[in-house]
Image (tube, coloured by chain):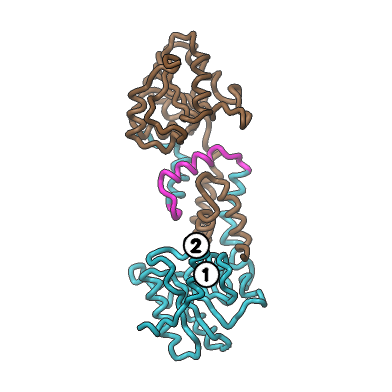
Chain colours: A cyan, B brown
Amino acid sequence: MRPLPEPIEALVARLVRLPGIGRRSAQRLAFHLAREKPDELAGLARAIEALPRELQTCTRCGNLAAGELCAICSDPRRDESVICVVEQPENVAAIERSGAFRGVYHVLGGAISPLRSVGPDDLRIDGLLERVAAGGVEEVILATNPTVEGEATALYIARQLRDRPVRVTRPATGIPVGGDLEYVDEATLSRALAARRGVLDED
Amino acid sequence: MRPLPEPIEALVARLVRLPGIGRRSAQRLAFHLAREKPDELAGLARAIEALPRELQTCTRCGNLAAGELCAICSDPRRDESVICVVEQPENVAAIERSGAFRGVYHVLGGAISPLRSVGPDDLRIDGLLERVAAGGVEEVILATNPTVEGEATALYIARQLRDRPVRVTRPATGIPVGGDLEYVDEATLSRALAARRGVLDED
């Protein structure tokens, strides 16, 4: 087996690190890009490089933002009495696509995972507790992923909020266990949000 | 449905133009990249932008090359009496992976397609005819894709070579009709190359 031309191999080595891109897909992408016009390639390169410069983290909820606050936190029509807690910004995008939620979000930045050395202090949990302590919050929906890590994170947060005058819920089963919240279809997400239940009720 | 942050949307718009990347995959990639370190993003951007600068077209066969000749044309161990004609450089990579071919290649740069206004003059067909006319070539394997365009291209080239003292073949059936040569598995490719037949014999 002959190696690919070096510039193609260098790009393939970068592309295979992306989620859902295997070596075969990476090669297909690299050869496709090798046929593209320099202008198109420069545009794609600029769009990638611009991300850290142009994206900020919302100082209130941790979502991706173009300024200090994200588009949702700066929207006066959102119901600030309900906070939906998710792991990552793409989970916000998925729930927004479902159109089933009019409250606000809190983006943790991940889930508690001893295997990956991610503890509660590595996530935006303190910020969430401060928002609840500041008052005006009636319900916290723990929409972390239905994985071991996501469930552990939800339980941890539920316990932290136990003595607060706030309802703590989790979206209903309906989200496939072991799946990734980002790939759940809109109808399932809508149903799961509508049928949410108290976290500690079921213990 | 709330739009994504602008830098994410700008990147998604670029990514969906790539083969095999739908809107959902593009969003997943963009959100993943938004979490990457600036160094990693700059490296990926550089690898993309470098392609037109660092890649050349082999002056003999049309394959991608780091210099004037590609790695195969500059390898003295390859059998120059057999030329395998393919549409694109990724097809060379696929056949090389099969390990079933020790000859050299000719990369057309596409296939004849009236729908896309691609005629024989838009492909590297003259270069192929010149290589055959120069002598020393005993067989031309027409390994264009098994699509309408690929078959038409093979037939066109076979007719151009009809009066030349050269055997003109096509890989055997075994490659799924309507498929893309790049995705054929190595075993199928090996078998198809071994069972190749004359193109005009079957008319």
Q: Residue B157 at what x, y percent from top left?
A: 51, 18
Find the magenta span and give its range. A17-39
| Label 2 secondary element | loop
- Whether residue B113 sits left or right of residue B161 in the image: it is right
Residue A185 is labelled as: 2
Residue B4 is labelled as: none
Pointer 1 residue: A190
Residue for point 42% across, 16% down = B202
Q: Residue A43 at what x, y percent from top left?
A: 62, 48
Q: Residue B147 at what x, y percent from top left?
A: 49, 30
Q: Which of the 4 image quarters holds residue B4?
A: bottom right
Q: Amino acid at mark 1?
A: Ser
Q: Bin the neighbour count of mark 1 within 10 Å (Cα to Cα): few under 14, some 14-19, many 20 and up.
A: some
Q: Main secondary structure of the magenta part?
A: helix
- Quadrant of the drawing holding the C terminus of chain A: bottom left
- Quadrant of the drawing holding the N terminus of chain A: top left
* Chain to which mark 2 belongs: A
Q: Amino acid at mark 2?
A: Asp
Count of numbered circles on the image: 2
Of residues B36 and B99, the one drawn nearer to the viewer in this rendering = B99
Q: Are the residues flagged by discs 1 and 2 from a single subunit?
A: yes
Disc 1 to disc 2, how far (Cα)?
9 Å
* Chain to which mark 1 belongs: A
